[in-house]
Image: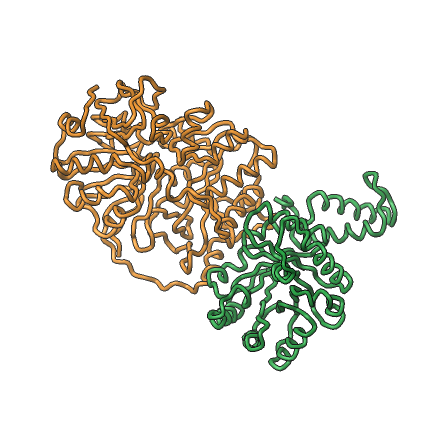
Chain colours: A orange, B green
Amino acid sequence: MKIHDSLDALLDALPLKDGLSISFHHHLRDGDRVINLVLNALKERNIKGMHLYASSIFPSYTAIKDLVISGHISDITTNYMNGPVAEYISENGLPGTLTMQSHGGRARAFEEGENKVDIAFIAAPASTKDGDVTGARGKNAFGSIGYAVSDALYANTKVVITDTIEKTLKPQIEGSHIDHLLKIDSIGDIARMASGTLKITKDPVGLKIARETIRFLDAVNAIKNGVSFQSGAGSVSLSITRMFNEYLKSKKLKGSFYSGGITGLHVNALKEGLVNDLYDVQCFDRAAAMSLLENPHHHFMSASDYANPHNPNRIIKDLDIVILGATEIDLDFNVNVTTDSYNTLIGGSGGHSDTAEDAKLSIIVSPLLRARTVLIKDRVNTITTKGTHVDVLVTERGIAVNPKRKDLINTLKNTTLNVMKIEELRQLAYNLTGTPAHKDHKLTPIGIVENRDGSRQDTLYKKE
Amino acid sequence: MARSYLFIPANEPRMLQNAYVFEADAIILDLEDSVAIEEKHEARFLAREFLRHHPRGSAKTYVRINTESDWLKQDLSMLEHVPIDGIVLPKLTLKMWNTYKKHAESIGVDTDIIGIVETPDAFFELDALGDKTPIKGLILGGEDLVSALKTTRSIEGRELLYPRSMVKMACARHGILAIDTPWTTLDETNLKTDIKHARTHGFDGKCAIHPNQVPLINEALSPSKESIDFARRVVEKHETTKSMRFSLDGQMIDKPVLARAKETLAKASRYGLLKEGLNENS
């Protein structure tokens, strides 16, 4: 392994060429500094037509937009994107293709040679001089570095960029996989890692949805000893996690594991003995990052161990309950969290489609109305997660169960929960908003949504 | 009868849209204190459209009107021919009642009235209000009252100990609803304490000024699972033995205890806590 003392020296040593494929992870979320640093340097060296494999793209990753405009990036494969890059691509497309994968699908695609990456640039909070890497130490410790493991194992050339060199550490990625090491002043701003979505809602509609979700889980007796649970980092999901913890405590129950992105709420559950283990692919806040370092029952996992559909030992195959959001849902329970109704890219699957498919009970939580926009459509604009993998929709005005889950429908007959058909729930919304006029869409393809198995699931179109 | 009465500012469309979502047993569309003077007209318009066209939820629907003469008339005119369960009349005194009655009769509004007692005058007329007006309930208006008394609300609630007792006593005497004043900050712990004050005094319901207060009020003013179980067994044993005096769990049961047990079950039924399959208080 080679250690370099400057970015220029590093780039001099790398096999740079036009059409290069490069990868980055997103563990520092909006606080990442490495992706802009490297991309700007590659632009200076005029490397054209690159294929960017970024596990996610956040608003601060502005260099991507610059390099797309200048022709240095032609193709992007990612799991999630929002902000200026997403807006630009929505309006203009790419010279090449945009491919949206899931977290599990990305890991699978690396392992099966579909994501062919020449150079993986791995921002690491701490590394040894031998290239052993952890996300859990250093001044910018973000905890788990789970999404970068595939890159480290399967890219042709692997580069670690760190701001902290330690003599020894317990590696999440072993140095034997790493080819180059560069130390810089700072890989990012850890304070911005938790910015954005990670707040428990105080919105009364969101809290109503959270309460209804717990009532639903109670009514179908889904929360039992040994239950496993995952929820996202959205404000409603976090409220559900808090209420889920309170439910376990009040009923004197203990869960087996929480998985996925981990927050302080999950950590509290572990500390209070409400759950046996945490399986962590990504820490969403500092409390989670600290816990991963200190608590032996808080386990690091790679994206493949988390959600790769072809990994028989993936954690989420044993997941009982997952709570997920939706921008749109349709009458067949297909869910869109990738685009808005005008084709603007506003997110992506992340682990949405992975967990919905694998979990025994997949629950979508969302307001039925956002201002005057109705959640339920005839057909979602983009299928992020297939309706066949979705069991229940919980809104502030009612609960709809996928007709395929006759067991749940029968169980709910004896409860006071406001359960109705999804068509009835939509009509209830229309009674408030009026029925929206049908709009003809002008469709110019700009990319695809991939199933987690690599098959084509849907097409992405240019913003209207 | 309702546990929670949620004030919804009538000039806020988003709140109106979700008015029946928040699980309040009753909503009060507010034209009075939460609406700025320059927005009174818009609030009346929005309230009327809401009452005419918004699908009704299961919650009772009231409107709090203004008491200044011109606004009172305009508010009542707006309420003509719209479906509501009643009007909430602020600053209730005998004089205010007479003013209201005169305008309501001339406009042709005839609906139930819940009065807010929030001035010292009102507290010297409580019995007369119960006697001489057809009001269906009294809301204690704690904030205005403490201002008039030159004091402030406290979490201990000592400043409202006497007013709460007076309101409850008058309501009990006249068989009308006693509804407690809202707690005006959003901290859950203090709200829970304030709800306890209402419960201790035997209030039937409590006002909420934020939707997030509603679940706590509903829970605290509902019969507990234990009290429902006990009431169920009291009534069952009474029906089996046909006796008015018997022992249960070492406690002597007589007519007042039996009456309370039946009231507990009636409340539990009203609030959907008895239905098969429901985990009570979950």
Depth order, front residue of B251/B71 = B71
Q: Quadrant of the C terminus of chain A?
A: bottom left
Residue A130 place in picture, x, y as percent: 26, 18
Q: Does B237 sit left or right of A20 as displayed?
A: right
Q: Quadrant of the N terminus of chain A?
A: top left
- Is residue A187 positioned above or below A463 on the image? above
> Residue A306: in sight, yes or no?
yes
- Is residue A55 positioned above or below B243 on the image? above
Depth order, front residue of A460/A62 = A62
- Is residue B94 positioned above or below A408 on the image? below
Depth order, front residue of A383/A6 = A6
Splitting the image into 4 quarters, where does residue A437 fall? Answer: bottom left
Outermost residue to the bottom: B106
Count of labels in the image? 0
Residue B84 place in picture, x, y as percent: 59, 69
Residue A45 place in picture, x, y as percent: 12, 35
Q: Does A202 sit left or right of B170 as displayed?
A: left
Depth order, front residue of A145/B241 = A145
Q: Does A407 sit left or right of B278 as displayed?
A: left
Outermost residue to the front: B150
Splitting the image into 4 quarters, where does residue A26 fall? Answer: top left
* Residue at (78, 62) in percent of width and height: B173
Q: Does A357 sit left or right of B142 as displayed?
A: left
> Residue A310: in sight, yes or no?
no
Residue B75 place in picture, x, y as percent: 55, 74
